Image (cartoon, rainbow, N blue to C red):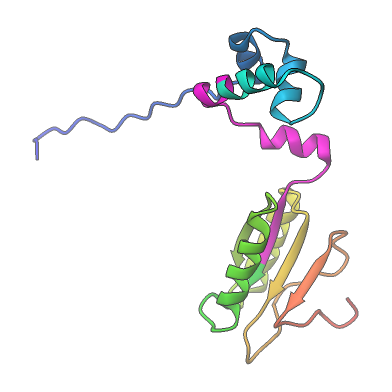
Amino acid sequence: MPANPEPATVSAKPPVTLREVAAAAGVSVATASKALNGRGRMTAETRERIRETARLLGFRPNSLAQSLLRKRSFTVGLLTNDTYGRFSLPLMAGVSDALVDKGVSVFLCNVEDDQRLGQLHVEAMLDKRVDGIVATGKRIDRHLPVDLSNLRIPVVYAFTQPDPGA
């Protein structure tokens, strides 16, 4: 190992924009958007040229912008105090497997048995505008140390119970 190793450098290129894809494909931004979203009327050749240009440039749609337009985050929170149990692990894997094919990401949070930590995680999920929460607990003690009532988003309880009155 050298005596004075070079510091690691990070090369972060800005993401490719839809405007850049449109310019490279020789079309308008609206046409590029329609082609990439499978909408609009255009020739198959134009649609394929735009998609190929996007692929070559490394274009990735801005999920934050899409979330604003669709009023959905395509993210579900998975809240648990059991990251090692024989019931919770298959449930977590099943939720993730079922949702990934629908374009939904799972945001996993382990609340352990800490009410403060649980509340912080719930607030983070709400800040990220998750579309819903799946709550799962330990097989022996099915109580999660966090209040999930009045969240204004769907909550599904699996191997846990809602707080009384929720």
Q: Position of residue 139 (x, y in %)?
A: 63, 88
At a point 72% along the width and 68% down the height, the residue shown is 134
Q: Looking at the figure, which quarter contains the C terminus?
A: bottom right
Q: Is residue 15 left or right of residue 135?
A: left
Q: Position of residue 123 (x, y in %)?
A: 72, 57
Indicate the quadrant where residue 156 lies: bottom right
Q: Position of residue 15 (x, y in %)?
A: 55, 25
Q: Which residues are the magenta region?
A: 53-78
- Residue 46 appears in view: yes
- Indicate whether residue 18 is drawn in magenta: no
Q: Looking at the figure, which quarter contains the N terminus?
A: top left
User: Tag count in the figure?
Assistant: 0
Up the image or down, 69 lies above or below 32; here it is: below
Indicate the quadrant where residue 80 lies: bottom right
Query: Considering depth in this image, is 152 or 121 the residue closer to the camera?
Result: 152
Q: Is residue 162 left or right of residue 56?
A: right
Up the image or down, 162 lies above or below 66; here it is: below
Up the image or down, 122 lies above or below 141; here it is: above
Most extreme residue toward the right is: 165
At a point 66% along the width and 65% down the height, the residue shown is 78
At a point 74% along the width and 64% down the height, the residue shown is 133
Query: Considering depth in this image, is 159 or 80 the residue closer to the camera?
Result: 159
- Residue 81 appears in view: no
At a point 32% along the width and 29% down the height, the residue shown is 9
Most extreme residue toward the bottom is: 140
Most extreme residue toward the front is: 44
Q: Is residue 153 left or right of residue 107?
A: right
Q: Position of residue 125 (x, y in %)?
A: 70, 55
